[in-house]
Amino acid sequence: MILVFKSGIDESALQNAVATLGSMGLDCQMLDIHEGVMLAVTSDTRSLPNHVFGQLPGVEKVIRIGNRFPLSESASPEPFSFPELNKRLFEPGVPVVIAGPCSVESQGQITRLALQVKQAGASMLRGGAFKPRTSPYDFAGLGKEALEYLKNASAESGLPVVSEVMSAEHVQLAEPFVDVFQIGTRNMYNYELLKEVGRTQKPVLLKRAMSATIDEFLQAAEYIIMSGNNRVILCERGIRTFETRTRNTLDLACVAVLKTLTQLPVIVDPSHGTGKRELVEPMSRAAIACGADGLIIETHDDPSNSISDSGQAITPETLARIVEIAKAIASLLKTSAENSRSDFVNRCPESRSAVG
Ligand code: PEP
Ligand code: MN
């Protein structure tokens, strides 16, 4: 960390700052350069907030040199395995497709859909029990009853389930029934909720807030990992822009950027990202092509009669096509990455041991 001092700072103020840092157990080194005076704090300052330094008399600016997302960057999460269901997800080169209705509507509906999406090649079931609705007059989900239906559908199909939680109370209620907690777009900034799911042992599917920058998105992931849970799945689900032809603007560049910043799996939600069923298939293809590790897709066996988000639901038949194409694209990308890697090793034999 670098502390930049106001110009004309006198020697005694500088010595005071050095002494204060010393009393905090921090080592530092004076940098007397042409433009002014700076202190390089050479100890680890990651756990100390910026104001601790910014409030030292004479300090003008605090510059952090290190990564702002230390946990998300270095987290190589525990395997996403679900031993009870004998399932392991996010293996390299195999796209994970999560599918199911926006809302759980009945036991019959969710069990039927679980079997249909499994048949179509999905590897996880989704379904909302607690629905965050923009209008308080819209269907808000069946709550606890839906969690029980999801658990039964999981037992019947062998698919793990993901469902959204909106409060600490929901986390406690849902824990025995779901395999993955979903944090929706409206709650990405709910830091107490992030800490709460971070204290559990279940993976967390974290959706990007509709107005969040990529940095804010990763900072939200930091909260979860910092609380003890590194199994975070990042989900791009579209952001708010001036465009009105689509429900949101699906920011696929975010996927490619995240891939340079973190090893956490990144998935895409083309359903909320577009709001239109006819756009789900092309954007699913694009998502896998730009490096996403998976997709979460709202699927219904009677899409136009889906209680919520009917305009974006696709049928299990369309889902089957998407799964097939997603697998083909992912395998093409894997082969091409392997080829360019071996090509590189052939051209530069000395790199063999470095590349491994
Ligand atoms: C959902 O997945 O049903 C949902 C409400 O998503 P989002 O939080 O992205 O709007
Ligand atoms: Mn929905």
Image (tube, rainbow, N blue to C red):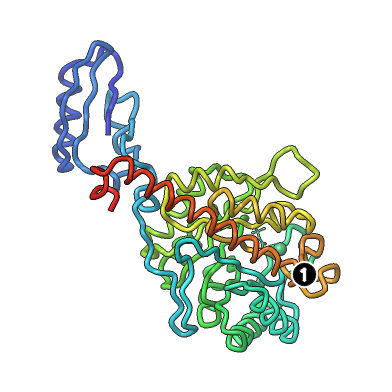
Give the answer, above or below, for where 163 lies relative to 187. Answer: below
Name the foreground residue: 53 vs 337.
337
**Which of the 4 quarters of the picture holds residue 313?**
bottom right
Amino acid identity at mark 1: Thr
Q: Residue under circle 1?
A: 315
**Which SS class for mark 1?**
loop
Residue at 58% over, 76% down: 161
Place of residue 31 in the rendered image (x, y in percent of width and height, measured from the top left): 19, 21
Residue at 66% over, 84% down: 149
Name the foreground residue: 213 vs 311.
311
Place of residue 35 in the rendered image (x, y in percent of width and height, measured from the top left): 28, 12
Name the quarter showing ligand 1.
Answer: bottom right
Q: In this view, does 139 lie to the left or right of 121?
A: right
- Toward the right, the furthest residue is 304
Mark 1 beta carbon near ligand 2 (under 8 Å):
no
Give the answer, above or below, for where 30 lies relative to 19. Answer: above
Q: In this view, does 286 lie to the left or right of 308?
A: left
Q: In this view, does 198 lie to the left or right of 276?
A: left
**How many C-alpha atoms fall within 10 Å of the one at disc 1: few (<14), some, or many (≥20)?**
many
Place of residue 115 in the rendered image (x, y in percent of width and height, measured from the top left): 67, 82
Place of residue 89 in the rendered image (x, y in percent of width and height, measured from the top left): 48, 70
**Which of the 4 quarters of the picture holds residue 107?**
bottom right
Image quarter in which the N terminus is found: top left
- Toward the front, the furthest residue is 346
Number of numbered labels in the structure image: 1
Name the foreground residue: 262 vs 180.
262
Residue at 27% over, 26% down: 57
